[in-house]
Amino acid sequence: MNSWLQLKFLSFTVNEWLYILLIFILSYVGFLMVWKFAIKKLSYLSAKAPTKFGDLIIEVMRSTNQFTFALFSLLLAMYFLELSAKWVTRLDYLSFLIIGIQIAIWVSKGITLWAKAKVVATDGSAENAVLTTMLSWIFKTIVWSIALLSILANTGVNITAFVASLGVGGVAVALAVQNILSDLFASLAIGLDKPFVIGDFIIFGNVLGTVERVGLKTTHIRSLSGEQIVCGNTELLKNTIHNYKRMAERRVVFEFRVTYDTKSDVIRKIPEIVKKAVAAESKARFDRAHFKGFGLSSLDFEVVYYVLDSSYNVYMDIQQSINLYLMEELEAMKVNFAFPSMTLNFAKNADLKIVMPEVDAANYH
């Protein structure tokens, strides 16, 4: 048995490899036990005093891959071998690499959970959905960049020259994809300034519809006719945007006309009738109704009221009710609505002479 244990494999005896295997197993089991105990303890504390940060830490720890524990345990066990200084340095590099990558994964996972919580908090239509996505992408880029530079610096790479090279290359890439970057920054501007959010009805240029999605490069709008309109964020922000979803109330101006044979005492009553028609609607506020003036073939009235709802359908329902009310009341008063017409008055006993054009019989067929 002693002779078998003294056999060498890769410059180390079987006895040394068994010793390393034992350390690896104990380290791996120890890491797993500490990991599970930490999660259990944090879950208990979080149940007693729930906090978003505590839940975030628990989810991040649960996302740890057990393969990472195995790799780190193996490297830890390898340190107990009598290695040359060159191999010890290599083990240091590998250990730092594993730790750096794992920390970057933890932070990246935390950023992902934070961004998801921000969006899900408002049923997927958060006002800051675009901003959250952009910030998440920027934070992850920073985290992985720091991790990469730290690993390279630890392995002896001159990161100063490396960063300078990246700067020159970044300028070249930025010039090549400036249109894409323009849309990305426009998306960030939409997230910060919030001219509209998902679900808003907007009009810009000749486009009108409901915002369905605000992406990093484009915005998707569902038009009234049903098709989806995809517009670049930069082009969208170049236009003046009318956001009807944020309209607290809608000012409505409409006119109607009655015939000239309507008596003056009836004309005086019509504004009160209009006021009653508007007051009968719970989501409308009366402003004014006036006998506006004398038209070519009608007596003109102008009415102004406010709809206390931004919905276009609510506005049309109210306008329809007002129109029907006016028709019923004016019909009961025997008042007729006017339409474009012309009245010709002929003077009595006037000599009328009708001149007929001469007709050339030769050209008449």
Image (cartoon, helix red, strand yellow):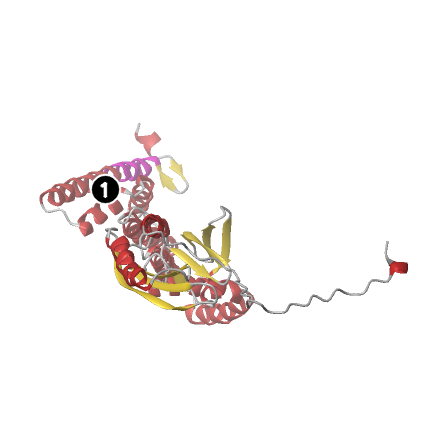
Question: Is 218 one of the magenta-colored residues?
Answer: no
Which of the two residues, 12 or 191, is positioned nearer the viewer here? 191
- Residue 228 screen position, x and y as percent: 50, 49
**Mark 1 neighbour density, 10 Å: few (under 14) some (14–19) many (20 or more):** some
- Which residue is disc 1 drawn over? 31
- Residue 24 screen position, x and y as percent: 28, 39
Q: In the image as oriented, which residue stretches furthest toward the front?
A: 349
Q: In the image as oriented, which residue stretches furthest toward the left?
A: 48
SS type, badge 1: helix
- Residue 312 screen position, x and y as percent: 37, 52
Q: Is residue 139 visible?
A: yes
Which of the two residues, 88 or 63, is positioned nearer the viewer here? 63
Residue that appears at 64% across and 67% down: 352
- Residue 89 screen position, x and y as percent: 36, 56
Q: Is residue 137 left or right of residue 271?
A: right
Which of the two residues, 335 or 147, is positioned nearer the viewer here? 335
Q: In the image as oriented, which residue stretches furthest toward the top?
A: 1
Q: Which residues are magenta?
A: 14-26
Hey, what amino acid is under mark 1? Phe
Prevailing secondary structure class for the magenta stretch in the rendered image: helix
The quarter of the displayed image where residue 28 is located:
top left
Total of numbered circles in the picture? 1
Residue that appears at 54% across and 69% down: 175
Question: Is 18 one of the magenta-colored residues?
Answer: yes
Q: Is residue 340 left or right of residue 261?
A: right
The quarter of the displayed image where residue 1 is located:
top left
Q: Is residue 18 above or below residue 45?
A: above
Q: Is residue 188 visible?
A: no
Which of the two residues, 158 or 22, is positioned nearer the viewer here? 158
